[in-house]
Image: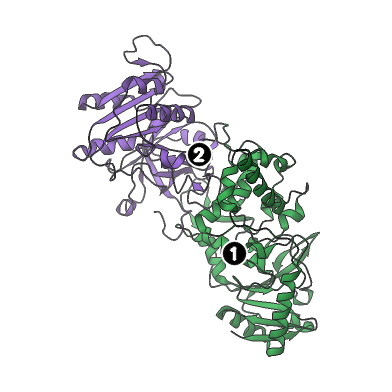
Chain colours: A green, B purple
Amino acid sequence: MGDYKFAKDKLAEALSGLTDYEVFAPAAVGDVLRFKVVEDPASVSLDYDNTTVPPKELMFPQTETLFKYRLGQTDIEPTVPDASAKRAVVGIRPCDALAYTIVDNLYGWDFPDPYYQQRREATTLVGLACSDPCANCFCPSVGGAPASEKGLDALIFDLGDAYYVKTLTDKGEEFAKAAGLEAAGDAEAKAAAKQGEEALGKVQRSIDTAGIPEHLPELYDDKFWEQFSDRCLSCGICTFLCPTCHCFDIQDESEGFDSRRARMWDTCMFAEYTRHTSGHNPRPTRKERTRNRISHKYSYFPEKFDVIACVGCGRCINNCPVNIDIVDILEKSKQAGAKEAKTA
Amino acid sequence: MMDESNPYLPYIVKIEDAWYETPVGDRAVKTFKVSFVDEKVWDTWSHEPGNCAMVGRLGIGESMFCISSSPTEKGYLRFSIMKAGKVTSALHELEAGDTMTVRGPLGNSFPMAEWEGKNIVSIGGGIGQAPLRPVINYVRANKEKYGDLSVLYGARTSDLHCFKTEFDEFTKEGTACHLAIDVEEEDWPHFVGFVPDLLMKVAPEPANTIAVTCGPPILIKFVTQGLEKLGFTPDQIYTTLEERMKCGIGKCGRCNVGHLYVCKDGPVFSYATLKEIPEAFA
């Protein structure tokens, strides 16, 4: 595909050219950085580490209407989004784009989910390569990289005085044309490749995932989990801010006679999540719930879809109020197994 | 499947008939016999014994229930629902003529074709008989394809027996039918004791036999142990599981036992499969 560039002070101009698209870019909302629709291109800055809230909400909103109806009547009006309404996400980090490719498996599995898939289809993903990975990033351990192209339609590199844009798909090419970007040469491509290599070397954390998916189920009854679950507050932030966490609840809501069935983010870290009507709960304590969160990402999901459901973005580590660290859990899970083997 | 392009949209069904299986009150079981308001749905609808559906009421919500009628019972679906929480209480308010929603069929089913030529033993407790009922009725309707059918069923009291009148029919047809209640009652001619004890007394022969069981988790646990003592191998024992569910199509996450989703990989599992998954009995 193509190579493009634009001067740093031309970002607003490029975004203004995207008249056919609904454009999303990172924006500060209070203390939180998250993707919002761009109202004023001049306000957009690509100078940030990563958003607090992952852009999963662009495909899978925090609350989403599945269908509408009038109370007492049986006519159901589906509210599936329109795939022909083009959207562009500008500045998504490679880890968050990788997350979509993982979650695609789930939403495309057997009963395809039209709400998620229509949005995916409509969206062009324009990534922003990381030149300075954050302290808790470990994307290379789970199939990513600071300049990974997976799941992206185009990838922007910040080359200091200008942005270099590498288009990766037809959608990306269309985006570059609409934004009116100028052609780049070999020099920019080389500089970008070099930056990607260097950034890879700057990632400080890692976990060797070999053997973990097979090993975790063996720790089902192990006391190992308690060293983490004992201090867990069940706040759920690790899952709500996880780009691959996809669990949801479904509820009916009415205002007067206007009603809807909606789905909303849910979390396996809450007791209510699995509690039966009878009161029985298969995951009654934080131990079972912590075990499920980690096992789902690193064992159950790979067993089903052949890919680990974690992209190493570090959000669950950065935002945990009691410093529970998934890399630490995974590292110690190996030792827990080794200890077992020795005593056996 | 409902709308091929949108698995979240339910069918509207009309309640043709509704009756209580057990005395009215908390935890009562009510059976609903329903048919699709849009009759054309029957042209594409097909389900197997073991399949489930999300049954609900607009404005309240939906929950997962087994379809308690066999596909050999034509022109209607049956659901037998215990009054336990918000959705089931709202469903219990409904009577013949009212509408509900059905989204399905969902989940896997009992491998009825694989079991042809074998004897079938059904072992149920309480409302756990609901998913076994379609198996029994399927075998009754296809007698020539299967060996002997026997039915073991128990509940705490005779009042709490679901599908009471049907057991008389089975006996008349020559199906061995063994009933139990937990505690002694006047004029009770059958077994008194728990279902696992009934199982050991009846002691079905394992040769060329499949055992299907459903009931409270404690029943499943002891029935499975009993079956193994009688010489049944894990791949001769089948059960159905239930967990809290929202989507029913393997997406919302909560019904997993280990790497398996009960809504989609289940609800029917052989004990050979479940043995490998500690969370299956959590």
Chain bearing tag 1 is A
Disc 1 marks which amino acid?
Answer: Tyr
Residue B279 in the image: state x and y as whole percent: 54, 39
Give the quadrant of residue A223: top right
Disc 2 marks which amino acid?
Answer: Ala
Mark 2 or 1, which is nearer the eye?
2
Write the residue at 53% across / 66% down. A118
SS at mark 1? helix
State the residue position of label 1. A100
Q: Quadrant of the N terminus of chain A?
A: bottom right
Write the residue at 77% across / 70% down. A132
State the residue position of label 2. B280
In this rendering, does residue A39 appear at all? no
Q: Residues within 10 Å of mark 2 (few under 14, many from 20)?
A: many
Residue B20 in the image: state x and y as whole percent: 40, 27
Residue A209 in the image: state x and y as whole percent: 62, 57
Residue A164 versus residue A287: which sits nearer the camera? A287
Q: A264 above or below B201?
A: below
Give the quadrant of residue A200: bottom right
Badges 2 and 1: C-beta atoms under 8 Å apart? Answer: no
Compared across the picture, whether B129 is left or right of A261 comes to left
Q: A127 above or below A217?
A: below
**What is the number of the mark on residue A159?**
none
Q: B127 above or below A179?
A: above
Q: B206 above or below B157?
A: below
SS at mark 2? helix
Q: Residues within 10 Å of mark 1 (few under 14, many from 20)?
A: many
Chain bearing tag 2 is B
Residue B280 versus residue B41: which sits nearer the camera? B280
Q: Quadrant of the C terminus of chain A?
A: top right
Cα gap from disc 2 to disc 1, whole angstroms: 30 Å
